[in-house]
Amino acid sequence: MTNTQQMELGFERSMRVASPHTQEHKSKAQWWFAQMRRVVAMTVEWQPTQNGRAEQIYLNMTVKKF
């Protein structure tokens, strides 16, 4: 006879063990984000430049026949 009830497997968070690789990745990520925060903190706020003066130009759009 077979059991018709569904088997359930649960993975508890407390059972998970952090591997050394996980800790290494976490420390690398923390270092990376610290560097990015430092870069953002060092940015310079640029003031917009004045618009250039308007210039009218003529484009010669003649078609050459071969």
Image (spheres, rainbow, N blue to C red):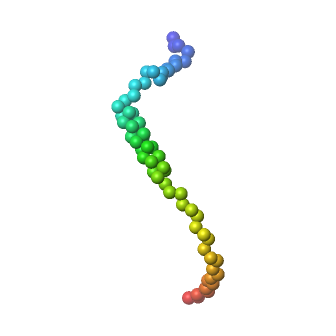
Relative to residue 7, is residue 54 drawn left or right? Answer: right
Residue 4 versus residue 29 in the image, above or below: above
The percent coordinates of residue 60 (x first, y second) are 61, 85
Q: In the figure, 23 relative to 51: above or below? A: above
Q: Where is residue 15 in the image (x, y as percent from the top left)?
A: 43, 21
- Depth order, front residue of 64/26: 26
Asked whether residue 61 is in view, the answer is: no
- In percent of width and height, residue 62 lies at 61, 86
Q: In which quarter of the image is residue 26?
A: top left
Image position, residue 25 (x, y; %): 39, 37
Q: In this view, does 35 lie above or below 11?
A: below
Residue 63 located left or right of residue 9: right
Please tell me in which quadrant of the rendered image residue 51 appears: bottom right
Determine the residue positioned at 49% across, 54% down: 43
Residue nearer the viewer, 62 or 5: 62
Residue occupying image coordinates x 64% and y 77%: 54
